[in-house]
Image (cartoon, grey):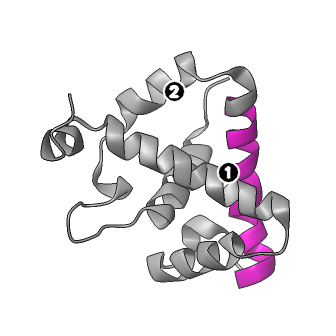
Amino acid sequence: MAWTTSECRWRDALLAAVLPAGQRHGGVASLELRAFWSTFGRHAPWDLRLVWRLSVWLLTWWAVVRAGRPLHTLPPQRRERLLQTWAESPNYLMRQMVMLAKTIAAWALLADPGTRAQLQIR
């Protein structure tokens, strides 16, 4: 099932908060991810795709409980702090959802041809 426009916005905001711009890269928000998501949708196991989508939903809307607004509507620094808090949560499921987001953000960054060239990875 294809992601809706809203879900894409939530997903991209989550990844941008997990892997923001740094000194050596522009972060996930600076990448063109269409090819990555197409490949992910075709090749990732169905259960990973399901858990990822569920994680995007839960983290996006859990922010309403914690910060009063959905994750994608928060300022970038507030998103990053909230994710850091969740990464250190005593709740195992919460920590695992953040870890999944970090893993997928790393895959997206390493799938980028510019990043691969900079790191001299074929």
The residue that appears at 41% across and 41% down in the rendered structure is 108
Q: How many marks?
A: 2
Element marked by disc 2: helix
Residue bearing mark 2: 40
The residue that appears at 45% across and 22% down in the rendered structure is 39
Q: Which residues are magenta?
A: 49-67
Lower position in the chain sequence, tag 1 or tag 2? 2
Residue 82 position (above or below residue 60): below
Q: Position of residue 3 (x, y in %)?
A: 61, 34
Q: Nearer the viewer, mark 1 or mark 2?
A: 2
Residue 9 position (above or below residue 88): above
Q: Quadrant of residue 23?
A: bottom left
Q: Quadrant of the N terminus?
A: top right
Q: Position of residue 81 (x, y in %)?
A: 56, 81
Residue bearing mark 1: 56
Q: Are marks 1 and 2 in contact (CB under 8 Å)?
A: no
Residue 94 position (above or below residue 86): above
User: Taking 49 as reference, is 42 left or right?
Assistant: left
Q: Could you tell me the amino acid type at mark 2?
A: Phe
Q: Quadrant of the C terminus?
A: top left
